Image: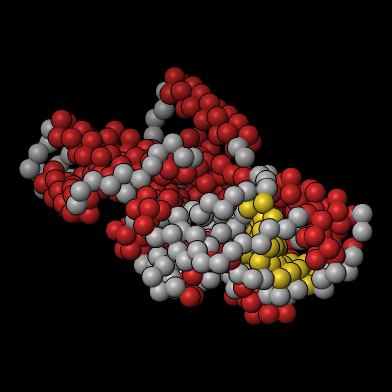
């Protein structure tokens, strides 16, 4: 490898680290993503033109065509995707990363047979890449609602036996027990099946955690291919993605007060939970109107808005920002309470509100906003459910008991905007709706908030 290419790889690696660091804050995330993308482009160009291998003209044409078509498709999808579909997009792109590692393993197997170290790397790439690919497709299907939870009898036992079988089968191939291409494809097929069975039983409420875990596996697969080719930028990039994904997975688990093993083997949020654990529903609900809600907000000194997935579904992020501006002009102190697992992926609400130009300083994380609720006059909950459910504190029989939540029940008045009284993503009823301080503003978030803004402007 030339000195020039080594320098390019070093620069690319630095951009990855800087970009990842900047992704930690909404204000710098866009710039960080751009910096990391520039580093990747440099690495790709450097590899194509400066790497010490012979490439024929026809291969340059094929590589150029593949880059153009792939970039065009990715750009079009990313530009057209709605914010509500962003988690599905992340899962789909993540699956493509796993598929890439899988295909590299298949191509390189014949070139490295006989070398235990290289063969081990190839087999690991095939297994991990296949699991990530098929598992990500299932996660994509669950997030867009086209797939439901599927539970086979003794599914944990089946999955564990299959996983151990994959490891044993891979070790058998590595140790020279087999060199048949047919067996490699059998390993590939078994890995794909395991990826499906791994994600099928996991409940919908746990999909954000699963996406983070699969993203980590994609990074590991990329690092493995970096080892295979002796490519440091692939190795470092894969390690960064793998470690960041794993850290995020544990952060998500902590935000739900659950262990990773409980997520994988417990299937929380699945159909069984919906059917059996509905939570306490004692008491009556109190309905309100946009006019009455506007009066309450108009005379408040401090208002906290709690955004949830319903806000994203209704595409109401711009209206909620307009509501915030109207209240601010009236002298009301307005802020947003952000729960770490609100929405369908980490940072979903931050990105959604940033799209409507909400001031980043108004986005307050759970640990910082919870002490403020007792001094809050009105909390406006828009499309959030499980992250404000007091059952997490009050009901030891609830599946979300112990989960850190936004303590909105401690505020003086609560307005909850929902389309219906249906249970949230976790499949359990929300005690907050029956609180004597809570008023339910039913309707589509965008329509309800638009009417609320209109009422406030007329006061």
Q: Position of residue 230 (x, y in %)?
A: 35, 48
Residue 376 found in image quarter = bottom right
- In the rendered structure, the answer to whether residue 182 lies left or right of residue 314 reads left
What residue occupies the far left of the structure in this picture?
Answer: 177
What percent of the width, then of the height, locates residue 283? 55, 67
- Which quadrant would the N terminus be assigned to in this image? top left
Question: Residue at left 40%, top 65%?
Answer: 399
Residue nearer the viewer, 147 or 3: 147
The quadrant the C terminus occupies is bottom right
Colouring rule applied to residues: secondary structure
Q: Nearer the viewer, residue 179 or 170?
A: 170
Asked if residue 93 is positioned above or below residue 398 in the image, the reply reads: above
Tally of numbered tags:
0
Q: Residue furthest top?
A: 58
- Residue 74: in sight, yes or no? yes
105 in relation to 19, above or below: above
Q: Residue 179 location, x and y as percent?
A: 12, 36
Of 113 and 383, which appears nearest the observer? 383
In this picture, residue 67 sits left or right of residue 202: right
Q: Is residue 111 above or below residue 331?
A: above
Residue 32 in sight in this render: no
Q: Nearer the viewer, residue 293 or 330?
A: 293
51 relative position to 194: left or right: right
């Amino acid at each position: 490898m030339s000195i020039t290419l080594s320098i390019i790889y070093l620069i690319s690696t630095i951009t990855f680290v800087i970009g990842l660091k900047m992704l930690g804050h909404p204000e710098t995330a866009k710039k960080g993503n751009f910096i990391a993308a520039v580093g990747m482009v440099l690495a790709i160009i450097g590899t194509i033109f400066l790497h010490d291998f012979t490439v024929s003209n026809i291969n340059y044409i094929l590589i150029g065509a593949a880059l153009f078509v792939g970039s065009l498709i990715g750009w079009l999808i990313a530009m057209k995707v709605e914010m509500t579909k962003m988690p599905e997009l992340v899962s789909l792109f993540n699956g493509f990363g796993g598929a890439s590692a899988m295909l590299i393993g298949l191509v390189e197997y014949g070139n490295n047979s006989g070398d235990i170290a290289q063969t081990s790397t190839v087999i690991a790439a095939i297994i991990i890449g296949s699991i990530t690919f098929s598992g990500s497709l299932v996660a994509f299907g669950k997030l867009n609602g086209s797939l439901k939870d599927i539970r086979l009898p003794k599914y944990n036992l089946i999955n564990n036996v299959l996983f151990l079988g994959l490891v044993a089968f891979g070790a058998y191939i590595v140790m020279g027990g087999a060199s048949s291409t047919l067996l490699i494809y059998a390993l590939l097929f078994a890995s794909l099946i395991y990826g499906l069975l791994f994600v099928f039983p996991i409940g919908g409420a746990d999909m954000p955690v699963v996406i983070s875990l699969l993203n980590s596996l994609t990074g590991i697969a990329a690092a493995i291919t970096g080892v295979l080719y002796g490519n440091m930028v692939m190795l470092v990039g894969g390690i960064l993605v793998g470690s960041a994904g794993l850290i995020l997975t544990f952060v998500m688990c902590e935000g739900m007060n659950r262990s990773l093993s409980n997520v994988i083997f417990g299937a929380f949020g699945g159909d069984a939970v919906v059917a059996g654990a509905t939570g306490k529903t004692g008491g009556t609900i109190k309905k309100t109107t946009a006019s009455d809600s506007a009066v309450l907000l108009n005379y408040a000194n401090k208002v906290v808005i709690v955004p949830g997935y319903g806000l994203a579904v209704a595409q109401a992020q711009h209206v909620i920002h307009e509501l915030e501006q109207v209240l601010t002009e009236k002298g009301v102190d307005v802020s947003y309470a952000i729960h770490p697992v609100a929405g369908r992926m980490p940072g979903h609400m931050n990105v959604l509100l940033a799209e409507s130009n909400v001031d980043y300083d108004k986005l307050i994380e759970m640990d910082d906003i919870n002490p403020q609720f007792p001094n809050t006059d009105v909390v406006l909950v828009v499309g959030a459910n499980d992250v404000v459910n007091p059952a997490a504190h009050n009901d030891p029989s609830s599946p979300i008991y112990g989960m850190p939540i936004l303590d909105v029940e401690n505020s003086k008045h609560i307005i909850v905007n929902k389309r219906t009284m249906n249970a949230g993503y976790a499949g359990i009823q929300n005690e907050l709706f029956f609180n004597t301080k809570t008023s339910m503003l039913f309707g589509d978030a965008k329509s309800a908030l638009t009417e609320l803004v209109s009422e406030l402007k007329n006061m």
